[in-house]
Amino acid sequence: MTYILPDEWKPSPKIRIEGNALDIVRSSSSMSVLAGPGAGKTELLAQRAAYLLTTGLCPPPRRILAISFKVDAARNLQERVSDRCDLVQAKRFESLTLDAFAKRIVDQFLEALSAHLRPTPDYKIIFPNRDIWEDFGNNHSDDYPAIRGKNNKQLEEIAHSSIPISQLEDATTEEQQIQWAWWHDQISATPSCLRSEEHTSELQSL
């Protein structure tokens, strides 16, 4: 594969990048970029990826992973890099949302998870709503009376505030008991249920 010399690399046609932005794209070190909406952050990232891939500074088999919070942002960046690199180079760039990346990690290392955290291989993604949290509260309020004083938002925050303990006997606070009950319900379900804030199709397509 033929690469472009770093000093000879230029931004994609019709894309104007100069000054500090160009220095960032060509930087040989990690950088943090702070900019407001519409400032061109996505294009800057796309050009940075194109620079690393087309100059060979990110050689095979190395790959580039971009993480976004929103599905549209992840897709937009992926499409821009695909438009600015050839097919072989573009395949070494992946733009995912945080939840999609987390799902891939779970799928790849499922058997390495502790038993109390390991979902069934056919686990499903759920999006807990008011009814789900109310059912959870009603089902466990007798065993864990503290649930009665929590609203749905508080229950959700408790359930996902940290990695749950492995055994109920290890719980030292009411919050840990509630958290254990939630995770035990989800993991022991058939199939297991894992929570996400993304659209199901975006996750299951990975």
Image: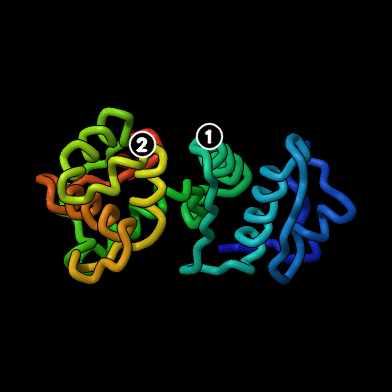
**Is residue 90 in view from this perspective?**
yes
Please tell me whether mark 1 sits on a helix, a strand or a loop: helix
The N terminus lies in which quarter of the figure?
bottom right
The C terminus lies in which quarter of the figure?
top left
Image coordinates for residue 134, horizontal then vertical, percent: 26, 33
Residue 12, disc: none
Look at the numbered discs 1 and 2 and tell me whether their residues touch, using CB distance below 8 Å.
Answer: no
Please tell me whether mark 2 sits on a helix, a strand or a loop: helix
Q: Nearer the viewer, mark 1 or mark 2?
A: 2
- 192 or 103, which is in the foreground? 192
Q: What residue is shown with label 1? A: 72
| Residue at 77%, 46% in the rendered image | 35
Image coordinates for residue 89, horizontal then vertical, percent: 53, 55
Going by the image, does 66 lie left or right of 33? left
| Residue at 67%, 43% in the rendered image | 42
| Residue at 63%, 58% in the rendered image | 54
Q: What residue is shown with label 2? A: 152
Q: Which corner quadrant of the image does residue 201 belong to?
A: top left
**Label 1 neighbour load within 10 Å: few <14, some 14-19, many 20+:** few
Of the numbered discs 1 and 2, the one sitting upstream in the chain is 1
Tag 1: amino acid: Asp
Tag 2: amino acid: Asn
